[in-house]
Amino acid sequence: MANICDLNDKKPDIKYPIFWEYKVILDSKDDINLIVKNIVGDREHKVEFSNFSKDKKYASYSVNVFVLGDEERLEIFSALKHSAKYVL
């Protein structure tokens, strides 16, 4: 699947270090704070509830993590994908 950066043959110009925001959707019964803590460890982070799905089966959160570079940002994204239904 192509994204806008692939189509323009450009990588996004991200200035590190930065607080990177991930949108995370998971089962509402899952403990987001425990999941995030296990992934980011002692890195500075903030978890904020966003919304429930219509049937309250899923919950969405904004997860902001202080990252130092591309590799770290992508590692966190990958780890979140293994625990969540969706990560944006």
Image: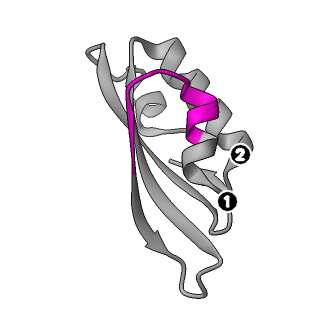
Place of residue 18 in the rendered image (x, y in percent of width and height, measured from the top left): 29, 22
Tell me how far mark 1 sits from mark 2, CA to CA: 9 Å
User: What residue do we see at 49% from left, 23% from top?
Assistant: 73
The picture quadrant where one finds residue 26 is bottom right
Q: Is residue 38 left or right of residue 50?
A: right
User: What residue do we see at 57% from left, 51% from top?
Assistant: 32
Q: Is disc 2 placed on a helix, strand or loop?
A: helix
Local packing at callout 2 (Cα closer than 10 Å; few below 14, some 14-19, many 20+) is: some
User: What residue do we see at 67% from left, 42% from top?
Assistant: 81
Quick check: 17 above or below 30?
A: above
- Mark yes or no: residue 13 visible: no
Q: What amino acid is labelled 1 in the image? A: Asp
Residue behind mark 2: 83
Quick check: 59 above or below 15?
A: below
User: What residue do we see at 41% from left, 61% from top?
Assistant: 49
Place of residue 25 in the rendered image (x, y in percent of width and height, measured from the top left): 57, 59
Place of residue 52 in the rendered image (x, y in percent of width and height, measured from the top left): 50, 75
Judge depth for marks 1 and 2 and give the one in front: 1
Local packing at callout 1 (Cα closer than 10 Å; few below 14, some 14-19, many 20+) is: few
Q: Is disc 1 placed on a helix, strand or loop?
A: loop
Q: Which mark is residue 30?
A: 1
Q: Are marks 1 and 2 in contact (CB under 8 Å)?
A: yes
Stretch in magenta = 36-47
Quick check: 66 above or below 50?
A: above
- Mark yes or no: residue 81 visible: yes
Q: What amino acid is labelled 2 in the image? A: Ser
Residue 44: in magenta span: yes
First reached walking from the N terminus: tag 1 or tag 2? 1
Place of residue 59 in the rendered image (x, y in percent of width and height, measured from the top left): 55, 68
Residue 16: in magenta span: no
Q: Is residue 68 left or right of residue 80?
A: left
